[in-house]
Amino acid sequence: MAIKRTAGPGRRLAASLLSRGVVGLVTDAGVRDIAALREMGFPIWARAVSARGTVKATPGSVNVPVVCGGQVVRPGDVVVADDDGVMCVPARSAAEVLARSRARIAAEHDRRAALRSGVLGVDMYGLREVLTRLGVEYVDEHPEGAL
């Protein structure tokens, strides 16, 4: 659901959204009531934190395209947010992006397992040749007492 707002959301809007099945909010506005939102378990990604309340005398819009962080978000688009950031996937690409994301997560799992087993990143990514072309000498082990 795309909601166009001119002022920052807080605990009351979060309570209303939670009651309707919304699991989080991304906004280009400020947000307030941070402690209460955290206690409610309602994640919000916002441009700023502000104590300023909302203006309720202006109309808003629902299910219309909005611009957030310079990105156009249309109704039906998939917005994914975590501690590393926020991204918007157009609805028409969502199934393909999901499949590619799952494949990437599986490959990442395999790479981490290889690194934990002792494989060096320089070998896993085929970087020894690149380093040699750049004139870099890669030393696997220092001779005893070299340091």
Image: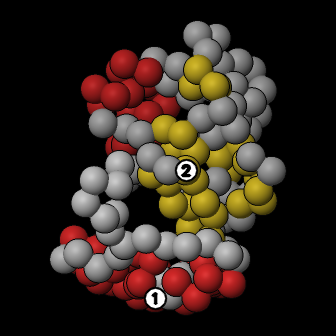
- Colour scheme in the image? secondary structure
Q: Which residue is mark 1?
A: 99
Rendered view: 118 above or below 44: below
Residue 106 position in % (x across, y down): 33, 83
At x 52%, y 44%, the residue is 25
User: For the view shown, which residue lies furthest in the top direction?
Assistant: 51
Let me know if residue 88 appears in the view. yes
Q: Is residue 117 left or right of residue 18?
A: left
Let me know if residue 16 appears in the view. no
Rendered view: 96 above or below 136: below
Closer to the camera in the image, 78 or 113: 113
Quadrant into which the N terminus falls? bottom right
Task: Identify the image quadrant of residue 133.
Answer: bottom right
Task: Identify the image quadrant of residue 137.
Answer: bottom right
Q: Is residue 49 left or right of residue 83?
A: right
Q: Indicate the amino acid at tag 1.
A: Ala
At x 50%, y 50%, the residue is 84
At x 44%, y 34%, the residue is 14
Q: Which residue is mark 2?
A: 85
Q: Indicate the amino acid at tag 2.
A: Gly
